Image (tube, helix red, strand yellow):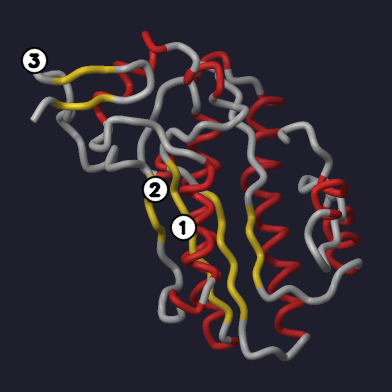
Amino acid sequence: MASESPQEAAKRIPGAQAEIADVTDRRSLESAFHAVPAPDVVAVNAGIGPLAALELTTAEVWNRTLAVNLSGAFHTVQIAAERMKRARKKGGAMVITASTNSFDGEADLIAYNASKAGLLGIVHTAANELGPHGIRINAVCPGLIRTRLTAASFAKPEIISEYFKDIALGRGGEPEEVAQAVLFLASDLASYITGTTLVVDGGQMASKFGTWGKETDHFDGQRWTRDP
């Protein structure tokens, strides 16, 4: 449930423990990490994306977005790395949620885009420094995924029909599809992968000139299909 608290969700998972932290507050993060054992896997996922044109982006919007999306990720990675190294474990894995906006300049999202581009700098640098300790760090870069932040867009076929024309698979993604990519990068299946990104966008970044729009194409309200 989207409104369910982490503590309630944890109760359904054997051995799980939930701690609440404010990623913009270093002390809050440290307290949460110290309340649990040293992690083997860390997923850095907190993020916000307020819309504002360049000239209307206030210092408050800019600072808040970077505090959550970029500084919050930095503090999480730094604290987690320290805990992983101190535990003297064989290694560990971190996965940061970046975005296809790490690479492009979608309008009205300058603070969000800058923060997501900055995450790749964290991934590249941390991979270089943490590799000798056996700690891997990578990023997933989702495209348009059906979440609470995007639910309003998914509910408007007139909007997403045009947007999905430039996605090779002709649809938006589901949270589970991003989760599976995170699971792969965190697992031993990715044991020789670090410092890189895995784009989870249905082929959007590869569809520069668009995929859909032929006479044989149809949009059913959620996805494009093509007649044989």
Disc 1/disc 2 C-alpha distance (Å)? 8 Å
- Determine the secondary structure under disc 1: helix
Residue 43 in sight here = yes
Q: Earlier in the sequence, mark 1 or mark 2?
A: 1
User: What's the mark number on residue 181?
Assistant: 1
Name the residue located 64 percent from the left edge and 40 percent from the top edge: 47
Q: Residue furthest top?
A: 158
| Contact (Cβ within 8 Å) of mark 1 with mark 2 | yes
User: What's the mark number on residue 215?
Assistant: 3
Q: Quadrant of the N terminus?
A: top right
Q: Nearer the viewer, mark 2 or mark 3?
A: 3
What amino acid is at disc 2?
Val
Name the residue located 21 percent from the left edge and 18 percent from the top edge: 218
| Contact (Cβ within 8 Å) of mark 3 with mark 1 | no
What amino acid is at disc 1?
Ala
Name the residue located 63 percent from the left edge and 49 percent from the top edge: 45
Residue 118 in sight here = no
Q: Which residue is mark 2?
A: 200
Q: Earlier in the sequence, mark 2 or mark 3?
A: 2
x then y, percent, for residue 40: 68, 76
Decide which of 42, 25 is in the foreground and name it: 42
| Contact (Cβ within 8 Å) of mark 2 with mark 3 | no
Q: Say if 193 sits above or below 58 in the image.
A: below
Q: Earlier in the sequence, mark 3 or mark 1?
A: 1
